[in-house]
Amino acid sequence: MAFIARYPDAKAFLTMIGDPDYQAATIHRTASLADSRLIRCAPIALQKD
C-alpha cells in the first residue's frame, strides 16, 4: 500500500515535521507500520495528444 501527499514546498514539509504536536503523534503512525519510506518526488508535465 502507498499514499501520496503533496506539500506547497519543502519548507512547509520541514515545518510540519518539526512541529512538536506532529512529532508526538508520529508514535502512533510508527507503531502501526511494519515499514515506511519517504520519497521526495517532483511533478512532471504530461504531454497532451
Image (spheres, rainbow, N blue to C red):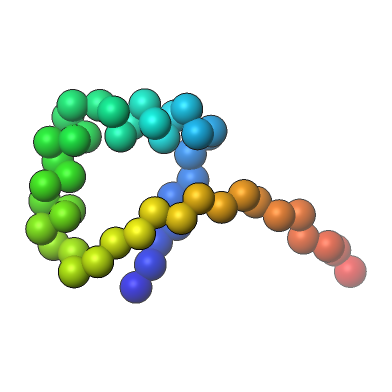
Q: Which residue lies furthest to the bottom in this view?
A: 1
Question: Measuring 16% from the left and 55% from the top, which residue is drawn there?
Answer: 30
Q: In this view, does 6 lie above or below 24?
A: below
Name the spot of residue 39 as percent of width and height, x first.
Answer: 46, 55
Say which of 39 and 8 sits in front.
39
Q: Disc count in the image? A: 0
Name the spot of residue 9 as percent of width and height, x first.
Answer: 53, 33
Say which of 14 and 4 sits in front.
14
Q: In which quarter of the image is the N terminus?
A: bottom left
Question: Measuring 21% from the left and 34% from the top, which residue is drawn there?
Answer: 22
Q: Along the horizontal axis of the image, is 21 left or right of 43? A: left
- The picture quadrant where one finds residue 15 is top left
Q: Which residue lies furthest to the right in this view?
A: 49
Q: Along the horizontal axis of the image, is 1 left or right of 42? A: left
Name the spot of residue 31 as percent of width and height, x first.
Answer: 10, 58
Question: Measuring 62% from the left and 49% from the top, which residue is drawn there?
Answer: 42
Question: Measuring 18% from the left and 69% from the top, which residue is drawn there?
Answer: 34
Q: Quadrant of the C terminus?
A: bottom right
Say which of 1 and 39 sits in front.
39
Q: Along the horizontal axis of the image, is 36 left or right of 11? A: left
